[in-house]
Every structure is written in structure tokens, then in C-alpha cells.
Image (cartoon, coloured by chain):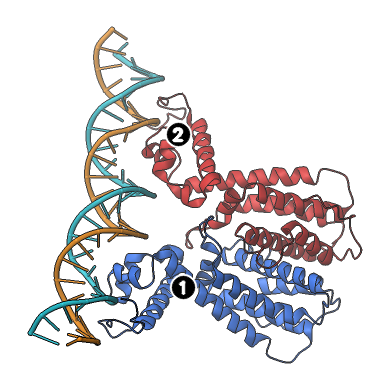
Chain colours: A red, B blue, C cyan, D orange
Amino acid sequence: MAGAEKRGTGPRGEHNRDEFLALVTKAAEGLVRREGLRGLGMRRLASTIGYAPNSIYNAVGDLDAVTMRVNARTLARLQATLEAAVASEAAPPEKAMALADAYLAFVAADPQVWSLVYEHQIAPDSAFPDWYAEALGQTTDLVARVLAPMIPDADERRQAVATLWAALHGLASLSTSRKLAVLTPESPRDLARLLIRRFLGTSGSVAPDRQDA
Amino acid sequence: MAGAEKRGTGPRGEHNRDEFLALVTKAAEGLVRREGLRGLGMRRLASTIGYAPNSIYNAVGDLDAVTMRVNARTLARLQATLEAAVASEAAPPEKAMALADAYLAFVAADPQVWSLVYEHQIAPDSAFPDWYAEALGQTTDLVARVLAPMIPDADERRQAVATLWAALHGLASLSTSRKLAVLTPESPRDLARLLIRRFLGTSGSVAPDRQDA
DNA sequence: ATATGTTTTGAACATCGTTCAAAGCGAGCA
DNA sequence: TGCTCGCTTTGAACGATGTTCAAAACATAT
């Protein structure tokens, strides 16, 4: 009664607990990818993986918990994408451009799943999830590292990172909701280039502005 | 059957049709203001105004239609607020700052209702609502008018307006969802000032940066 | 006063998220 | 082997939702 740290028994099927978590998360992600937030339902998700809804409640939690899992995975994927984008050795301004490009390409490639991250509103009383703040911090740290050579002052850099991050978020958000196309025909990536060029004050052209989209 | 433009009969209660529309819209707005998107339900809305749900279906439509009405009103209120903000005679850079300030103040004063505008996702197959595109255009035209003296070229100005609009939207969005405070302690208005100062290249201080918040 | 057409509504339908209590099954002990 | 313990899985149920149907209530026009 007091010990039993290992486990009393084991699961029935061919999945252990972690595999089941991954199964649920990937199935939910697929549902969102194909039909958006409204396509993610508990009964539907359960039938997709061939389980009863209660199994998901026992292993993961309610629909909010499932959404959190998907969002955590999405942020990790975004993080990996951005890391790969700044891996090359290039001048800082080009790195900033590459970062914005990778961000917007990620969003364009998976708009529904990315939208879930900000469409999902947590209850206003519950505290901010730790893992979310950490994931966000890791990603913005990446931006800060890229901006470090151009903005030496730490305070100013922190403000610049937050501002640029919010601006990119706005471009991506309005783009996926088709509200950006109402204002201008340019792609969000072109606008991001404009933003970064003007914000960072790299007055001339940063790159020959190759147009392949 | 062919004519009868006026009306066959009249409503029962003390409200005519337009008054009823306004009643529904304002009640729905109040619900959202107090409890957010999740607090807006058809049965709850009906009981709030003392009618049966079916009356709302007959006069307004389904819950999506109600949401649209609230959002139209919100955009009109925002439009009026921004118009008032640029009414004063001042140098263009200060006007741009005032515009951003008014926008973010509007969002901060009514975050839940404002969030409804972008939280509400229309079906991906249905076309964009005309009135929404028009309302958006009117508001961004205001920004374009403010920026006109500083950016004479029409193409460049259109891009700048879209970019700044998206950036403001991002600041407001991350602010209401408490994701901006994770990154930096500064208020979104301070970050907007930084954004505009850097974007518009008004290198020095635009205003003495009076701090009253 | 009767007929007409709209407004209003009570009841029903389908579905949803979630919970409860029982059945199913693997592991440890006798 | 047989048995119990404890976790896993589930069928059924509960409450609530958005939405629709058909009937009742009502104001007007003849």
C-alpha cells in the first residue's frame, strides 16, 4: 500500500502508456490538420484510434489536455524548424530573414495545426502552463541569439525580440485567416522582409531579394 | 403575394425587428464581455433577453450569424475610436503613435469582445463576408491616410499599412492571451512605440515618451 | 368577425463532453 | 495451479448543447 513504485499491473493492448499518449496526440493532430479545431472531438478521436473515449480520459485527460499535447508537439516542431534555419553561417541580417522565412513557411505548410496553438484559450483563472512558457522562451531565445550581434543592449534586445515575435505572429495569424490578402497581394514573407529590413535598419537591400514564390 | 413591400403583420412584443436585432447583438456582446466566446450560447442568449431560442433563429440566424453581428459592431466601434484618435492636428509620426495607442487601448479595455473578432473562424469554403472586408478596408484606410505624408509611394504605403496592421494585431493578440508578458514586462503600447519608431525611421524620440500607465 | 401571414414557442432530434460503475485482463502470491 | 489485487477498458447514462418542426399566439387587412 505504501510502496509499489514500479507498477501494479500492465496495460492490456499492444501499447504501453507512452506509446498510447503518442498515438492519441498524433491522431488528434491529424484530425486538426484535416478539419481544424472543430474537427477535434472526443468521440471522434477515440473512434479514430479504435478505443473508447474513457481510455483517453484515463490516460491523457479531457479535450483541453489533448489540445495541450498537440500544441506542445507543434511548438517543439517549430523550434526544430527554426533551429535548422539558423544553422548556416551567414551575416546576422540574413539569419534574421531566414528565421522569419522558416517561421512563415512552417505556418503556411500546416496552418490548421499551428492555429490551434493560439486558438486554444486556457481558462483565465488557471495559471499559465509551465511547459508552454518554457517552449516559448526557448524559441524566442533563438531569435535573441540571432539579434545579439545587431542589438548589444540586453533590455533593448528583449523588447525587440518580443516586438518582432508579435509582429510575425500577427502576419501569420492574419495570413491563415485570409485577412491579410484583403489588405495587400504580397505574401506574408515579403511583408516580413519589409518589416525586418525597416525594423533592423539594414537600410540597403539585405539580399538580392530572390523571388521564387 | 407579389407585392406587400411594407409588411403583412407586425411583431407581438414592444420591439420591432431592428430593435430586436440590436437587443440580441448587445446581449450577445455582454455575454462575451463577461465570459468570453465560450459564454455565448444560443439557449443562454435567448434566456438573457427573455425569448425562446427560435426567435433568434428567425430574426438573426444561427450562432455564427449572431457572432458576425457582434463582430461588425466591434469593428465599427474600433473604427470610431481610431477616427477620434487622429482627429487632432499633429505631425504625422505622432499621429501614427496615437493611432497605435488608441488601438491597443481599445483592445485592453474590451479584450474578450475584441478577441471574438479573430477567434471566430469562418468556414473555409464560404466566401469572405463583404461587410467585413469593407470594415477592415475602412480602418486600414485610416492608417494609410496617416502614413501618406511619410510614405508617398502608393505600393510601398500599402505594404507598410498591412505590415503595421498585422504587427499591431500580433501585439494585441499576444497581449490578451497573456503570451506577451512571458517575453517581456513592457506594455504592448511601449512595444508598439518601439515598432513604429523603428519602422518609420523617425530616428530620434518622437515624443517625450510621457509615461502615464 | 373572419381570414392571413408573421411571430413566438414547446417539444423533439441529434450530438456533444464527461462521468459512473461494472467487466476484462495482467501480474504477484499462496 | 488457483486466487486476489489493481489497473485498463468499456457500455451506458447524464446533462447540456445547437438546431429544426409543427403548432399556438397574435396583429393586421378585409
**Residue B187 appears in the picture as rendered:** no
Image quadrant containing the N terminus of chain A: top left
Q: Residue at x 28, y 86 (%)?
A: B14
Left or right position of A41 against D10: right
User: Are discs 1 and 2 less than 8 Å apart at CB?
Assistant: no
- Mark 2 crowd level (few <14, some 14–19, many ≥20, 10 Å Cα): some
Which numbered dot is residue A134? none
Image quadrant assignment for residue D15: bottom left
Q: Residue at x 41, y 80 (%)?
A: B22
The answer as to whether the residues below labels 1 and 2 share one chain is no
The kind of residue on which mark 1 rests is Arg
Q: Residue at x 32, y 84 (%)?
A: B15
Say which residue label 2 marks: A49
Q: Residue B145's spot in the image, x, y percent?
A: 73, 81
Q: Secondary structure at mark 2?
A: helix
**Residue A68 appears in the picture as rendered:** yes
Residue placed furthest toward the right: A204
Above or below residue A155? Residue B86 is: below
Say which residue label 1 marks: B69
- Mark 1 crowd level (few <14, some 14–19, many ≥20, 10 Å Cα): some
Q: Residue A40's spot in the image, x, y percent?
A: 47, 47
